[in-house]
Image (tube, rainbow, N blue to C red):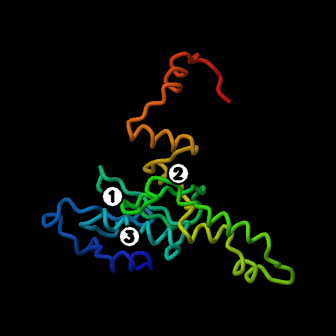
């Protein structure tokens, strides 16, 4: 039994050998590194908890979490060799006043700028990492997270802050007339750089 499997069992995952499909046919299958290890009856809550623990640094930042609602599967990958890229996080907490905006705030930028003032001469790498907020601080603060290609398939990703603002306006029912006019008059074969 792997540590992650132990962790999932503590969060009410029913082990595969104990699972009775007749009792709970709609349970979500749990896969760890491609192996079906168990099922869970409340996947929404489970995925939410595991993502929160990954974002606050309790679980590995390189862990990949994929929930396929349609197939009722929750896949966790911890194995090496997966190509991941960092992405900024958008606050999706329904009770947060910052909901729908980047988690990255002025306070994080200030901490990164303060790193430049720290005298690290004579320190080894571990001491330097301890003193500085840096990349590790962004990961542990839940500002940035790593995603592999498979997790990106089920994630909503916006490419620019302008896209995020446009999404907010559209959700509020605000249609930008300039944008609509320029879209109608744009050459569809125009090369966009």
SS of the residue under disc 2: helix
Residue at 57% over, 59% down: 82
Q: Quadrant of the C terminus?
A: top right
Position of residue 175 measured from the top left corner of the image (x, y, whole percent): 44, 31
Residue at 55% over, 15% down: 185
Discs 3/1, front: 3
The answer to whether 115 appears left or right of 55 in the picture is right
Q: Nearer the viewer, residue 166 or 149?
A: 166
Q: Which label's residue is closer to the chain start, 3 or 1? A: 3
- Disc 3 packing (10 Å; few <14; some 14–19; many ≥20): few
- Disc 1 packing (10 Å; few <14; some 14–19; many ≥20): some
> What label sits on residue 25 in the rendered view?
none
Residue at 29% over, 49% down: 70
Q: Which label's residue is closer to the chain start, 3 or 2? A: 3
- Disc 2 packing (10 Å; few <14; some 14–19; many ≥20): few
Residue that mark 2 sits on: 149
Q: Tags 2 and 1 in contact by the CB under 8 Å rule?
A: no
- Spatial separation of the CA atoms under disc 2 and disc 1: 17 Å
Residue that mark 1 sits on: 73
Image-quadrant location for residue 18: bottom left
Q: Nearer the viewer, residue 144 or 150?
A: 144
SS of the residue under disc 3: helix
Residue that mark 3 sits on: 49
Position of residue 128 measured from the top left corner of the image (x, y, whole percent): 76, 79
In this picture, is 7 found above or below 171? below
- Spatial separation of the CA atoms under disc 3 and disc 2: 22 Å
Q: Nearer the viewer, residue 161 or 74?
A: 161
Q: Which label's residue is closer to the chain start, 2 or 1? A: 1
SS of the residue under disc 1: strand
Q: Quadrant of the N terminus?
A: bottom left
């Amino acid at each position: 039994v792997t540590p992650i499997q132990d962790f999932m069992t503590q969060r009410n995952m029913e082990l595969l050998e104990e699972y009775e499909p007749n009792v709970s046919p709609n349970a979500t299958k749990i896969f760890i590194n491609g192996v079906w290890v168990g099922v869970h009856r409340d996947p929404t809550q489970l995925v939410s908890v595991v993502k929160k623990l990954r974002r606050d640094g309790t679980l590995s930042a390189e862990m990949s979490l994929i929930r396929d609602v349609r197939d009722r599967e929750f896949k966790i990958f911890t194995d090496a060799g997966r190509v991941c890229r960092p992405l900024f996080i958008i606050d999706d907490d329904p009770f947060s006043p910052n909901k729908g905006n980047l988690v990255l705030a002025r306070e994080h930028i200030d901490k990164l700028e303060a790193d430049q003032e720290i005298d690290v001469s004579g320190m080894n790498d571990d001491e330097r990492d301890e003193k500085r907020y840096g990349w590790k601080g962004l990961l542990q603060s839940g500002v940035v997270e790593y995603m592999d290609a498979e997790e990106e398939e089920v994630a909503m990703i916006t490419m620019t802050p302008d896209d995020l603002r446009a999404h907010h306006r559209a959700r509020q029912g605000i249609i930008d007339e300039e944008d609509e006019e320029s879209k109608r008059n744009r050459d569809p074969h125009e090369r966009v750089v």
